Amino acid sequence: MMIQGALGVLAILPFAVSRALQEEWIMVILDLLIISGIVSLGVYGRNGANFRIVSTLFTLMYTSGMLAVISVKGPDMLFWAYPTAIGGYFMVRLRVAISISVLSATAVTVLVYEALSAFQLSGFVVTYLLVCLFSYFFAARMTQDKQRLSEQATIDPLTGANNRRALDDAIESRVSLFSRRAAPVSIVIIDIDYFKRINDEYGHAVGDLFLQRFVEFLNGVVRQSEMLFRFGGEEFVVIAEGRLEEARNLSEKIRERFEQAQLIPDHPVTVSIGVAELGHVETSREWMKRADDALYLAKSLGRNRVCLAPSLERQSTKVSIDISIPAEKENA
């Protein structure tokens, strides 16, 4: 938007000066109104306004300016219709750009209908629509490429889960949200017990397939509002809505169901889980470390269990962590 605005000002300003010298004051006023509108919206956008709203207003403003110039000067100003049409496809959503283009083409046709022959008018309409069509395809391709690159940057290619980069962004976002609204949220770190044995016994191809099925299993257990990430190797993270006890219930459901799932026939696999609720005045790194410490304790105590990091309010020692042990181990 800033680039388009700067180019618009540089393109219009010389015409405004020239028209002022020729005393075409109506056109001078129009040019200055367009320039002041561009500058005002640029400043408004730079001050943190919603970009979607500002970009729509920006597109409508210079499209209206183009129509006003054609209304005053007639068909001689038709060439301004082309850059305004192209600019809209890079400023607003494609559906909005199409709507503006159709309305603009209709308005221009009405304005110059009596001044042009049928051949000239049809020539303008065809060329204008071609410019809009080419702009649409180019902008659509650019949008698809942007989405694809974004997915490549944030999605784990093997499992389809969100990757470590997406996890870092999500954690920072939740910590920021918590500081404003204190919405309770917990981290659940899941580690597949003895995963290396699967690779050693069945090969890495089976290990990769196992991880893909494990993500499918987790997606069937966690809620849609909860985000799943591959933390690295055989470790996965769920950002769970709610307090520690709710995250504990989710973790126990994951542990119990996975123990019974047997993704590899006759080869039961278990998981160890560490859970930590975000505390007040806690950084993302501190939050993640408490969950990781709880996971480490779960693994050191024999695996196949859920360990809860104590809340910061009652944390007194590093080892005061609640432990959930499978029933058969308690009986033993």
Image (cartoon, rainbow, N blue to C red):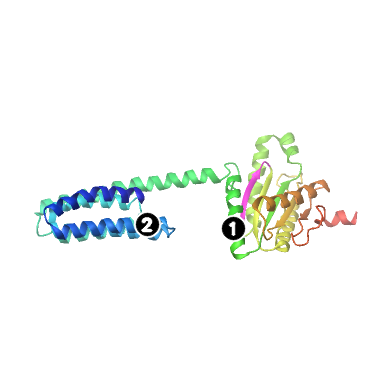
Could you tell whether 255 is left or right of 121 in the image?
Answer: right
Q: Which mark is residue 184?
A: none
Q: Classify mark 2: residues with Cα within 10 Å, few (<14), some (14-19) or many (20+).
A: few
- Residue 224 as seen in the image, left or right of residue 20: right
Task: Classify 131 as above or below 224.
Answer: above
Q: Amino acid at mark 2?
A: Val
Of tags 2 and 1, which is closer to the observer? 2
Give the residue displayed 30% in from the left and 50% down from the top: 87
Is residue 205 visible in the rendered image? The answer is yes
Closer to the camera in the image, 68 or 153: 68
Where's residue 272, x and y in %?
Answer: 76, 49
Give the percent coordinates (x, y) of residue 55: 36, 57
In this picture, which residue range is highlighted in magenta? 225-233
Q: Identify the secondary structure beneath mark 1.
A: helix
Choose between 118 and 297: the one closer to the eye.
297
Mark 2 residue element:
helix
Residue at which label 1 appears: 176
Q: Residue at x 27, y 55 (%)?
A: 35
Q: Position of residue 39 (x, y in %)?
A: 32, 56
Amino acid type at mark 1: Ser
Residue closest to the far right = 332
Q: At x 42% / y 58%, what residue is drawn? A: 47
Task: Report the Cα–Cα distance between label 2 and label 1.
Answer: 27 Å
Q: Quadrant of the C terminus?
A: bottom right
Most extreme residue toward the front is: 21
User: Is residue 132 among what the camera can see?
Assistant: no
